[in-house]
Image: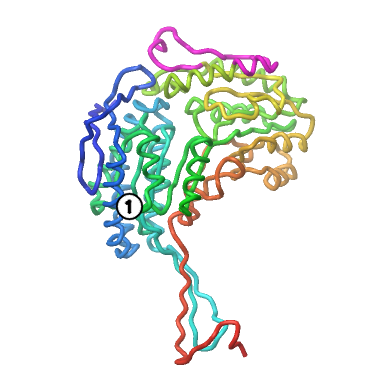
Amino acid sequence: MVKLEIEKLRNYINGEWKEVARTTAVVNPATGEELVQVPLSSKEHVEEAVSAAKKAQKEWALVPAPMRAEFLYRVGYLMKEKKEYLAQLLTSENGKVIEEARGEVQEGIDMAYYMAGEGRRLFGQTTPAELKDKFAMSQRVPVGVVGIITPWNFPIAIATWKSFPAIIAGNAVVWKPATETPIMAFELAKILEEAGLPKGVVNVVFGSGNEVGNALVHDENVQVISFTGSNDTGRGIAAACGRQLKKVSLEMGGKNAVIVMDDADIDLAVEGILWSAFGTSGQRCTACSRVIVHEAVKSTLEAHLLARMEQLTIGNGLDESIKVGPIINKEGLQKIKEYVSIGKEEGARLLAGGMVLTEGDQRSGNYFAPTLFTDVSSTMRIAQEEIFGPVVSLIPVKSFEEAIEVNNSVSFGLSSSIFTNDVNQVFRAQRDLDTGIVYVNAGTTGAEIHLPFGGTKGTGNGHRDSGIQALDVFTEWKAIYVDYSGKLQRAQIDVE
């Protein structure tokens, strides 16, 4: 284990580290110990950051995109050098187990290199003009100042999904990280500074959503808001941005399902369910919280799942042997407890877990036992609402068609999965599952950065994080016509 040295957290505005008087504690969810104090910035700090970003963006947009890419290549290299250190910091403030933390840092490294590559693409189009001696093309142009608001569950991955495409496209960024996980934001800002990114291109302002997030959303000099978080907050942001005619990208969660058909490899399905349901302690927007299982294999799947759940080790994620870490905070624990009570009241049968863990090494942290309900109907609240914890509901079905219908019966549409060896069912599922991500013979998690990430229905508003599609959020299309005929030509009128 490397020695962690957590510095005093400060805002990063216009290339300078600025202290904020008002702070609150950042707590390790595995131990209850205070790690550091996070600044609670004000509207004035946001205005200062936006002003710096606005000024810097004009110069940054004039830097050729392949040269902008060189900064991101350096960022990726520095992140790679510091991968283990960053991963252990991430586990300390977030709680996810160390192997997941390493994977998340790697995702940020991958995004740096991938988006740096886009610096030599950022393709537009050339197209024939309908008039003689006329040239027509389109190109991507930056939008200006981008505000990004990121959650605590993936404090470095989601930040890179949003900031790196914005940077490579020629924008400047003001970033509000989650107050629960500010250390990763501070470390990433240090890396950006070390890579030589010009002052003001990326600014980090710590603080609450009510104060900093609200100020960012309502600042007239911010052209785009990219947000990942709860539906209630996202809807409020969308409404505020709509009144300002401001572009907004939302990713707001899921109620994801693994479908297990009667011909599935049960052991493989169990592996996929365990990873998807209990990785990050279920605190992922792609987490599996529903298992839609064919009634012919329901009993077998239950038995195999229960046996494997008994083997899950729960504790401090810095221990390499641990597979399930803590819940982020006490409020999260309370929400999960309430949903377990709701499930019991609705008539679901609790097979395992369902309680806060308070004995031994788990006494000081926020631990909830991996939980399995069975005999759940698709209309129950625990089968419809996002719990954001290690709680899985088994929903029996009689057919493939019913499985698809149950999968699609929720208000979210992020990720879905099917385990089957029937190639015809595979292709029907790919077509009929109404989610933005579909997995076959794998769990509901594991998105790769070169594909678009996002969902349908209540999961978002149609935009995507990662992949080249992320550039659509942070660019506008400009159409350009060059008439070299030497005379006025009118489109659609002077066509011979």
Res 84 visible: no
Q: Residue furthest right?
A: 398
Q: Amino acid under label 1?
A: Leu
Viewer-closest of 370 and 389: 389
Q: Is residue 439 left or right of residue 114?
A: right
Viewer-closest of 338 and 156: 338
Specify the quadrant that holds the C terminus.
bottom right
Return the x and y of residue 454 as percentages of the image width and height.
Answer: 54, 45
Q: Residue at x 68, y 19 (%)?
A: 374
Q: Residue at x 68, y 24 (%)?
A: 380
Q: Residues within 10 Å of mark 1 (few under 14, many from 20)?
A: many
Viewer-closest of 346 and 353: 346
Q: Is residue 297 left or right of residue 360?
A: right
Q: Residue furthest bottom?
A: 486
Q: Residue at x 57, y 14 (%)?
A: 354
Q: Which residues are magenta?
A: 341-368
Specify the quadrant that holds the N terminus.
top left
SS type, badge 1: helix
Q: Is residue 347 magenta?
A: yes
Residue that mark 1 sits on? 72
Based on the displayed image, in which of its 4 quarters is residue 421 positioned? top right
Res 327 visible: yes
Return the x and y of residue 291 as percentages of the image width and height.
Answer: 65, 28
Q: Residue furthest front?
A: 243
Relative height, residue 427 to residue 353 (above, below): below
Return the x and y of residue 435 as percentages of the image width and height.
Answer: 62, 43
Viewer-closest of 275 and 344: 344
Relative height, residue 412 to residue 75 (above, below): above
Return the x and y of residue 299 as percentages of the image width and height.
Answer: 72, 19
Colour approach in the figure: rainbow
Relative height, residue 273 to residue 350 (above, below): below
